Amino acid sequence: MSAEVRALGSYVQAYLICPRQVWLMSRQICPDEDNVYLELGRLIGAQAYGRERKEVRLEHLSIDLVRRGDRDFVVGEVKKSSRAREAARMQLAFYLYELREMGIEAEGELLFPEERRRERLILDDSLARQVEELKVRVLALIYRDQPPPPEKIQFCGKCAYAEFCWA
């Protein structure tokens, strides 16, 4: 494993749901590309919020949406449902934290187009500390030689990596 591995937003989100998935992702092990839930997420991401600027890549960040707010940029994270809301919230907080480290102040919005919901997120000191701690845990996991053992959780039934755990 290279010494220049960085935490990614998708790792942060996945870590809070299934650490084993992060380890697999960090090894560029591809999920089942025919997984219907993976396709559904991509479709919703592509079709929702047509007037916004989508898929903005900045260094190691891959941000779903960016638009200009009243005073700052607004960064949006699109999810197909709020089922893993806390993990999505921390992924968005990670983006805001990393942007702040680059000198870019932004606000965040969690977007659930199928539920017609959006939630505003501001990176405060407490949330920034949570992100820092989470980054440390994610990187420690990535540097492990072996993945964590599979653990049956509520998300396994829709996971595109299920075959790596349960086949």
Image: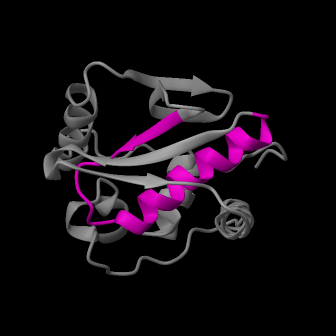
| Residue in the picture at 75% in, 46% down | 5
| Residue in the picture at 46% in, 59% down | 89
Q: Is residue 81 magenta?
A: yes
Q: In this view, does 103 lie above or below 19?
A: above
Residue 149: x %, y % from top left:
49, 78
How many marks the image carries: the answer is: 0
Q: In this view, does 62 lie above or below 131?
A: above
Q: Quadrant of the image for the C terminus?
A: bottom left
Q: Give the range drawn in magenta.
A: 74-103
| Residue in the picture at 73% in, 65% down | 125
| Residue in the picture at 49% in, 69% down | 16
Q: Does the magenta stretch include residue 50?
A: no
Q: Confirm whether residue 52 shows in the render.
A: yes
**Between 32 and 19, the one nearer to me in the picture:** 19
Q: Residue furthest right?
A: 3
Residue 11: x %, y % from top left:
55, 54
Residue 166: x %, y % from top left:
29, 70
**Between 76 and 31, the one nearer to me in the picture:** 76
Residue 38: x %, y % from top left:
25, 44
**Between 52 and 14, the one nearer to me in the picture:** 52
Q: In this view, does 54 lie above or below 150?
A: above
**Between 136 and 50, the one nearer to me in the picture:** 50
Q: Confirm whether residue 28 shows in the render.
A: no
Q: In this view, does 54 lie to the left or right of 45?
A: right
The image's colour scheme reads: one colour
